[in-house]
Image: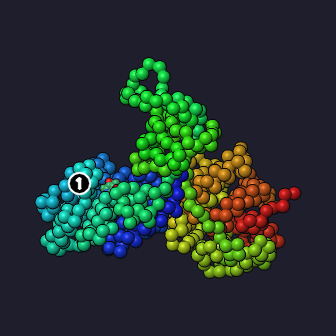
């Protein structure tokens, strides 16, 4: 079942981040990418990081926790002051927090010491908008009290404007922030690496070249995700305002009068609607989305002939009078959305989130580089037992290598006699590339993933899937869930079949990343397939299941690197039986169809 869907084009967000980062860097300004409008989506955060932001910032700890668990490595910044109940989690999930209360800062210092870390803070100064911040006149006194607090490092000051008082950032008030920073650095002989001059509302100063020198940091959200006003015209021109598309289903399409009939009173929201006196019957659509999911005022139909009329909790009415019967029952309507509607759609559990990132498949004639992770001679064993021929049969040349970087012309194939959790796969993708992972293994829990993940490829854990795990407990599953890792057990494969499960596996691993790493542990295969006389390997995947999964993966064109674990050492595979199986599996992963007998 799919209902309304929000499609997030990560390439457009990445481009927006890059445009804003470049424009800011040109003026000596770093950018924190603010992810709060997307509920701290790690995919959106990663797109911003690819675009060059220096930190990821969010107002909610839950969101930062989600991003941190996913494995993002840039510093995370909490931009709403923590409550006294959130002190410990702030130290855990944020590297930097914006603060304005001494008591909170003291508590943060204590918690940081307990954890044995130093927590960085940015002291917020109120420049007139009267939301967070100490008053400018108190700055030196407050800093004098902060500096001796152990566990805390004051790395900057900042200001937020235009959010509640409507006070705009100006040359005057931001110069005042720079002045205060100078006073602090002089008086206390410290460095203040961050002087954070606000949010999207500060961009007009950047564009007109009037940003006071000394402002070296901005926290940008609405401009990166939607080029939302007040993004100034020159930058707006370079930005995508359509990174998000909301799509809803048509559940009624009829010609109806333009005026309601019957006894008139209040509507469902206590308002008294007014209508033109002239009655012009017109074609109108009802879409299955409503105020529970979005604010209708924030939706703009992509087809300019359509107009949003009104909405109740679950129904959105659209005037389709200018489109004949083009829009029909069963069809859909697409909208661009504004910041308010985006916040609602992202938080609504009824709106499905879909992430797209135009993926480039590897070159058709890429080189497969075989790398032994141990000194077991597996690479040469495979090359001697048919892998070179199998690969050249589908257009890939095959060489042995010491190490390899996954790019579009090289596909690393790591080989190990150990299972995945005992191997260290030093995947290095090109900078600015994010991968998911599909791991076929009979064992797997979150601790193993966390300890191997760092080497596996700095992967997105929300894009990691474990397939084929035996004896998984409810606790296992829950722990993996918390990190967004999908677990597909061998029982589920038995029950539903590989073909039914693979679409979900591929969506989880491949959505919104540049490609996937595929790992396959040989001991997941039913021992009978390989003629291994070993009863511990019974009840695993069959030959057909393994190849079917590999073919599904190959059809997506997502594979960027492969590793095969628990391969029998070359000298215990004299007949090359296992080698033949591995060759066939790799060939299936890279696009050869298994002949259906
Ligand atoms: C939300 C927020 C931002 C980002 O604001 P945008 O207008 O979306 O760029 C920056 N700083 C703080 C403190 C915020 O709460």
Q: Is residue 153 left or right of residue 393?
A: left
Task: Determine whether 509 is above or below 248 in the image.
Answer: below
Residue at left offset 43%, top offset 64%: 237
Residue at left offset 72%, top offset 78%: 398
Residue at left offset 65%, top offset 70%: 362
Residue 321: image x %, image y %? Answer: 55, 39
Badge 1, how many Cα within 10 Å: few under 14, some, many 20+? some
Residue 389: image x %, image y %? Answer: 80, 75
Task: Determine whether 26 is above or below 107 in the image.
Answer: below
Between 182 and 199, the residue placed more toward the observer is: 199
Residue 447 seen from this side: no
Residue 210: image x %, image y %? Answer: 26, 69
Residue sitting at the far front:
278
On the image, which quarter does residue 496 sit in?
top right
Q: Is residue 152 left or right of residue 454?
A: left
Residue topped by disc 1: 167
On the image, which quarter does residue 410 sit in?
bottom right
Q: Is residue 162 left or right of residue 404?
A: left
Residue 342: image x %, image y %? Answer: 44, 48
Number of marks in the image? Answer: 1
Between 481 and 230, the residue placed more toward the observer is: 230
């Amino acid at each position: 079942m799919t209902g309304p869907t929000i499609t997030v084009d990560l390439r457009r967000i990445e481009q927006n981040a890059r445009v804003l980062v470049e424009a800011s860097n040109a003026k000596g300004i770093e950018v924190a990418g603010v992810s709060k409008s997307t509920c701290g989506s790690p995919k959106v955060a990663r797109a911003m990081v690819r675009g060059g932001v220096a930190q990821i910032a969010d107002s909610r700890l839950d969101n930062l926790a989600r991003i941190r668990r996913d494995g993002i490595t840039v510093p995370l910044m909490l931009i709403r002051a923590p409550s006294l109940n959130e002190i410990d989690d702030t130290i855990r999930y944020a590297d930097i927090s914006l603060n304005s209360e001494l008591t909170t800062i003291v508590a943060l210092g204590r918690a940081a010491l307990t954890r044995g870390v130093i927590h960085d803070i940015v002291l917020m100064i109120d420049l007139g908008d009267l939301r967070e911040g100490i008053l400018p006149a108190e700055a030196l006194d407050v800093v004098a009290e902060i500096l001796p607090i152990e566990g805390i490092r004051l790395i900057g000051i900042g200001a937020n404007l235009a959010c509640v008082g409507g006070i705009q950032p100006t040359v005057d008030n931001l110069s005042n922030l720079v002045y205060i920073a100078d006073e602090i650095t002089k008086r206390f002989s410290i460095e203040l690496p961050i002087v954070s001059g606000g949010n999207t509302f500060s961009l007009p100063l950047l564009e007109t070249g009037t940003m006071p020198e000394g402002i070296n940091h901005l926290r940008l959200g609405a401009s990166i995700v939607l080029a939302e006003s007040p993004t100034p015209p020159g930058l707006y021109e370079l930005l995508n305002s359509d990174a998000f598309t909301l799509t809803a289903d048509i559940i009624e399409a009829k010609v109806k009068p333009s005026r309601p009939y019957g006894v008139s009173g209040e509507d469902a929201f206590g308002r008294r609607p007014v209508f033109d006196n002239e009655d012009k019957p017109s074609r109108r659509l009802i879409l299955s989305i409503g105020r529970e999911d979005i604010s209708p005022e924030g939706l703009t139909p992509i087809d300019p002939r359509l107009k949003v009329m009104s909405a109740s909790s679950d129904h959105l009415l659209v005037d389709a009078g200018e489109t004949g019967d083009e829009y029909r029952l069963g069809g859909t309507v697409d909208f661009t959305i504004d910041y308010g509607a985006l916040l609602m759609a992202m938080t609504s559990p009824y709106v499905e989130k879909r992430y797209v990132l135009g993926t480039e498949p590897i070159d058709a004639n890429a080189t497969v580089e075989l790398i032994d992770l141990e000194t077991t001679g597996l690479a040469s064993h495979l090359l001697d037992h048919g892998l070179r021929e199998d690969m050249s049969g589908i257009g890939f040349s095959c060489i042995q290598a010491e190490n390899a970087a996954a790019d579009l012309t090289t596909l690393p194939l790591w080989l190990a006699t150990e299972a995945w959790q005992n191997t260290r796969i030093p995947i290095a993708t090109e900078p600015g590339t994010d991968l998911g992972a599909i791991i076929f293994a009979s064992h797997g829990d979150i601790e193993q993933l966390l300890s191997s993940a760092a080497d596996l490829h700095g992967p997105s854990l929300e894009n990691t899937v474990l397939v084929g795990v035996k004896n998984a407990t409810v606790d296992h599953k829950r722990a993996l869930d918390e990190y967004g890792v999908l677990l597909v057990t061998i029982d589920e494969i038995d029950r539903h079949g590989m073909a039914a499960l693979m679409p979900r596996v591929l969506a989880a691993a491949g959505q919104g990343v540049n490609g996937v790493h595929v790992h396959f542990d040989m001991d997941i295969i039913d021992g009978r397939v390989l003629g291994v006389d070993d009863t511990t390997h019974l009840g695993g995947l069959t030959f057909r299941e393994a190849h079917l999964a590999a073919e599904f993966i190959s059809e997506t064109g997502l594979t960027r690197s492969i590793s095969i674990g628990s391969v029998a050492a070359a000298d215990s595979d004299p007949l090359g039986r296992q080698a033949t199986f591995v060759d066939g599996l790799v060939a299936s992963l890279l696009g050869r169809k298994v002949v259906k007998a």
